[in-house]
């Protein structure tokens, strides 16, 4: 019975989310990605293990991707009659070991599409390479995310996107990646590859959700430039995997730097709630975030010819 249930789950998660157009996949780099040894074997899909409620809000297995050596962007366009011209690059979590592709990738793109935003899932490099030690953020994913912002901005006209309304959202380790991208735009973390790398890699806004690593990085002197874009932080108060201090301290650092920031911490809420609907208070964060994006001016109707 367990084998049948697993097969059914795999069939369900293999179905693409409903959007205005069939998702398009674009390679991130013109050749081999920077510092990529290419020694970890072929890319693979797997199912996460069932977890306990005290650890995560969504306990059933979901689809993961690992062994990524060729980063890509998967583009989910909203229906044409809803399209606002805004876009958000999506960074799934997974501790920089795997990518929670279903719950923190495809489902996020589907949610963004519902209110007219193009969702662009970043398949960044995982797992950590031998020179990326456990306990600190891996460095290659930031190379991929910086390149992603510049690439999307370079294609903005072709893809019907406003280059000044390209945000980034991330979950868990991906939340750290979103913040790292939003605060590291002054210097590339890799040698420029082509003219795309001459284009700004500063996102227009950032949405880090139950992020990790931030507390330790801030304590070690992480800098927040005054030009950091607006940030919307979300966390669960009972998160044992990434404690809410990560987001709370990040909010205070943003405030000290004069950066527009909003923080939401939900009581009796653990890790890994993604964007799925819930009658619990944390289930309202997606609607609140949509309102924030609208209030910030990122959801204005696109100008069409």
Image (cartoon, rainbow, N blue to C red):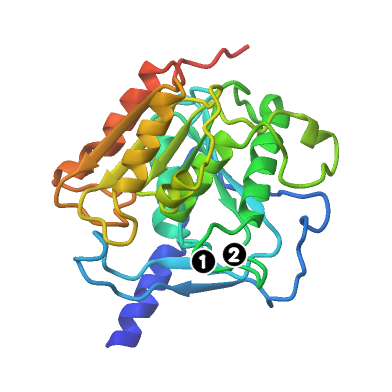
Of residues 242 and 278, the one nearer the viewer is 242
> Going 61% across and 37% down the picture, which residue do you hit?
184
**Residue to which mark 2 is pinned:** 126
Residue placed farthest to the front in the image?
220
Question: What quarter of the picture does the C terminus occupy?
Answer: top right
Image-quadrant location for residue 304: top right
Locate residue 193: give its quadrant: top right
Left or right of residue 142: residue 226: left
**Image height of 249 relative to 153, above or below:** below
- Residue 79, given in percent of the width and then of the height, sits at 47, 32
Residue 74 as seen in the image, left or right of residue 51: right
Find out whether the residues at labels 2 and 1 contact each other: C-beta distance under 8 Å: yes
Q: Is residue 162 above or below residue 134?
A: above
Taking the image as shown, residue 82 lies to the left or right of residue 1, namely right
36 lies above or below 144: below
Helix, strand or loop at mark 1: loop
Residue 118 coordinates in the image, percent (x, y): 52, 35
Q: Mark 2: few, some, or many residues within 10 Å (few <14, many ≥20)?
A: many
Question: Whole-Å distance between the Cαs marked 2 and 1?
Answer: 6 Å
- SS at mark 2? loop
Judge whether residue 242 can be spotted in this image.
Answer: yes
Name the disc covering residue 281, or none.
none
Image quarter in which the N terminus is found:
bottom left
| Residue 233 place in picture, x, y as percent | 36, 37
Image location (x, y in percent) of residue 182: 55, 35
Name the residue at 58% across, 49% down.
122
Q: Residues within 10 Å of mark 1 (few under 14, many from 20)?
A: many
Q: Give the number of callouts.
A: 2
Q: Is residue 17 visible?
A: no
**Among the two numbered marks 2 and 1 on one chain, the one whose residue lies closer to the N terminus:** 1
| Quadrant of the image occupied by residue 51 | bottom left
Q: Which residue is mark 1?
A: 98
């Amino acid at each position: 019975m367990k084998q049948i249930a697993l097969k059914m789950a795999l069939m369900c998660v293999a179905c693409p989310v409903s959007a205005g157009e069939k998702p398009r996949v674009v390679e991130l780099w013109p050749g081999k990605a920077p510092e990529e040894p290419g020694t970890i074997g072929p890319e693979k899909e797997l199912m996460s293990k069932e977890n306990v409620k005290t650890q995560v809000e969504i306990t059933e297995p979901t689809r993961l991707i690992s062994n990524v050596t060729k980063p890509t962007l998967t583009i989910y366009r909203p229906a044409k009659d809803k399209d606002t011209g805004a876009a958000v690059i999506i960074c799934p979590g997974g501790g920089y070991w795997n990518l929670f592709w279903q719950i923190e990738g495809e489902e996020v793109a589907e949610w963004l599409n519902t209110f007219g935003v193009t969702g662009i899932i970043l398949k960044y490099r995982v797992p950590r390479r031998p020179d990326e030690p456990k306990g600190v953020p891996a460095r290659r994913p930031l190379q991929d995310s910086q390149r992603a912002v510049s690439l999307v901005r370079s294609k903005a006209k072709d893809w019907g996107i406003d280059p000044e309304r390209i945000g980034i959202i991330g979950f868990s380790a991906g939340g750290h990646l979103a913040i790292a991208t939003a605060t590291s735009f002054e210097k590339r973390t890799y040698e420029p590859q082509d003219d795309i790398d001459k284009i700004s890699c500063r996102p227009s806004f950032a949405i880090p959700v139950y992020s990790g690593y931030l507390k330790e990085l801030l304590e070690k002197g992480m800098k927040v430039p005054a030009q950091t874009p607006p940030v919307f932080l979300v966390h669960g108060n009972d998160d044992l995997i990434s404690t809410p201090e990560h987001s709370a301290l990040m909010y205070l650092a943003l405030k000290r730097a004069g950066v527009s920031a909003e923080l939401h911490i939900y009581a009796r809420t653990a890790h890994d709630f993604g964007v799925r609907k819930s009658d619990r208070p944390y289930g309202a964060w997606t609607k609140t975030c949509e309102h924030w994006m609208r209030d910030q001016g990122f959801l204005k109707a696109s100008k069409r010819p």
